[in-house]
Image: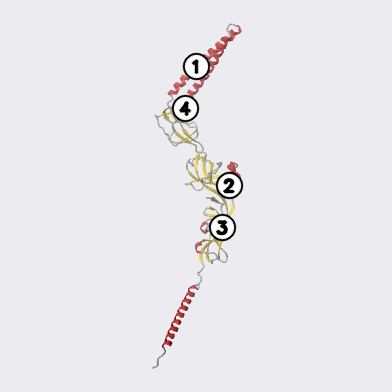
């Protein structure tokens, strides 16, 4: 039996191992290449597209405000006394001059009688002084009295006339105090409850208690805060310094009402901005003949009403956000999605105004935006933008 050399056997084994290693490396390389080989492209993403609308729109600015009474009066007694009668019902409408409270008048009737008597005495003394002065005139002409006596008679008349004037003022004061026992409403409006009831003694002066309050109901004020940019826009239109503010229309509505049924105008704009909030106080005046608005209520306020103008409208869900930018995906005739930056305006009955970036009738993705990337081919399903048919009535835009 022939024996092979040991060196030859070792070389054969080393060569076989090398071949095995090379084969494994080749297999790994082929596997890696296979994993990097792109598979077939997925199908076009299904999306819903709609054409950009163009419709006439009236643009308004919207704010939140509070109703305020034009006149609000705290009813206080002008004289001290005991409440004898209350002549109103809580919450009723009262007119200027209506009787509200009656204080016990008897002490003031006595003061008036006393003042009348004092005045009568003063008048009698004045008449006597006049008679004495007339007599003194005749005697001085006849040189029957001295000039000193004549002067005394004349001074007595002046003193008597001054006393009459003082007593007349005292009588007038007594009559006023007697009138003040009947407390009447100074304004027309709605009255609150009686804060102090029958039989209570009330005082007068600066610390006099509030008996009730009356607030006017028509017209009413609506106060709200306008942001600086909006104010600057109105100021640029001629409303600076309250010049021309009465031409700015206002509409208001309660939270329980549909739309803005209450109409009015701007009465005034404050004289400085609030540095803390960056807003300025605005006051509008609205008619309230029906009494629907109550002072203190919250209202929605629309201001402005620029003339109708054509505006491009899209649905809010079609808008994407890219950091501080807004964009939409425009789908052309080749069904390819194109990224488009846009500038947005206010909402119009569920649709958003587009200031720049789009044109009328361009198709944009309104549903499935999250599945689309720029330059992707999509499978569009055509829908209508919004719920309203185009070409009907003008819409109203609200800048929130």
Q: Which residue is mark 1?
A: 120
Between residues 55 and 318, which one lies in front from this camera angle? 318
Rendered image quadrant of residue 355: bottom right
Q: Which mark is residue 180?
A: 4
The relative height of residue 111 versus residue 270 in the rendered view (above or below) is above
Q: Which residue is mark 3?
A: 342
Q: Confirm or deny contact between disc 1 and disc 3 (CB under 8 A).
A: no
Residue 89 as seen in the image, left or right of residue 341: left
Cα separation between marks 4 and 3: 70 Å
Cα–Cα gap, marks 4 and 2: 51 Å
- Cα–Cα span, label 4 and label 1: 24 Å
Q: Secondary structure at mark 4?
A: helix
Q: In the displayed structure, would residue 261 be above or below residue 42?
A: above
The reply to whether discs 4 and 2 touch (Cβ–Cβ < 8 Å) is no
Q: Earlier in the sequence, mark 3 or mark 2?
A: 2
Q: In front: mark 1 or mark 2?
A: 2
Which is nearer the N-term, disc 4 or disc 3? 4
> Label 1, label 2: how many angstroms apart (C-alpha)?
69 Å
| C-alpha span from label 3 to label 2 | 24 Å
Could you say which disc has been placed on residue 232 in the image? 2
Q: From the viewer's perspective, is the residue at label 3 or at label 2 nearer?
A: 2
Q: CA distance from mark 1 to mark 3?
A: 91 Å
| Residue at 43% in and 23% down | 107
Whether 34 is drawn above or below 101: the answer is below
Q: Nearer the viewer, mark 4 or mark 3?
A: 3
Q: Residues within 10 Å of mark 3 (few under 14, many from 20)?
A: some
Check whether the beta carbons of the residues at disc 3 and disc 2 lie within 8 A of each other. Answer: no
Residue 227: x and y, percent? 54, 47
């Amino acid at each position: 039996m022939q024996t092979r050399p040991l060196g030859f056997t070792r070389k054969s084994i080393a060569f076989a191992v090398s071949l095995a290693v090379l084969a494994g490396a080749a297999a790994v390389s082929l596997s890696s290449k296979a994993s990097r080989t792109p598979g077939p492209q997925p199908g076009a993403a299904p999306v819903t597209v709609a054409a950009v609308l163009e419709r006439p729109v009236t643009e308004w600015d919207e704010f939140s405000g509070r109703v305020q009474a034009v006149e609000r009066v705290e009813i206080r007694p002008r004289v001290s006394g005991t409440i004898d009668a209350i002549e109103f019902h809580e919450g009723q409408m009262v007119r200027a001059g209506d009787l509200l409270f009656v204080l016990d008048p008897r002490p003031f009737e006595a003061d008036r009688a006393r003042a009348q008597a004092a005045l009568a005495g003063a008048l009698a003394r004045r008449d006597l002084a006049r008679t004495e002065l007339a007599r003194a005139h005749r005697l001085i002409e006849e040189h029957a009295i001295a000039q000193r006596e004549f002067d005394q008679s004349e001074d007595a008349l002046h003193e008597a006339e001054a006393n009459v004037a003082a007593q007349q003022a005292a009588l007038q004061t007594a009559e006023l105090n007697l009138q003040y026992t009947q407390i009447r409403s100074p304004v027309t409006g709605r009255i609150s409850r009686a804060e102090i009831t029958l039989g209570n003694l009330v005082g007068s002066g600066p610390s006099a208690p509030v008996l009730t309050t009356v607030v006017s109901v028509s017209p009413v004020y609506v106060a709200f805060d306008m942001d600086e940019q909006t104010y600057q826009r109105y100021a640029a239109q001629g409303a600076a310094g309250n010049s021309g503010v009465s031409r700015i229309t206002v509409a208001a509505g309660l939270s329980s009402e549909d739309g803005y049924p209450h109409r009015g105008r701007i009465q005034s704009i404050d004289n400085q901005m609030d540095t803390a909030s960056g807003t300025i106080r605005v006051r509008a005046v609205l008619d309230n003949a029906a009494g629907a608005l109550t002072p203190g209520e919250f209202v929605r306020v629309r201001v402005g009403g620029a003339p109708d103008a054509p505006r491009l409208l899209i649905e809010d869900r079609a808008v994407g956000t890219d950091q501080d930018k807004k964009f939409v995906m425009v789908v052309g005739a080749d069904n390819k999605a194109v990224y488009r930056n846009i500038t947005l305006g206010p909402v119009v009955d569920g649709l958003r105004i587009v200031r720049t970036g789009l044109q009328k009738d361009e198709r944009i993705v309104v549903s499935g935006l999250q599945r689309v990337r720029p330059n992707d081919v999509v499978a569009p399903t055509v829908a209508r933008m919004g719920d309203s048919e185009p070409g009907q009535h003008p819409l109203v835009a609200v800048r929130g």
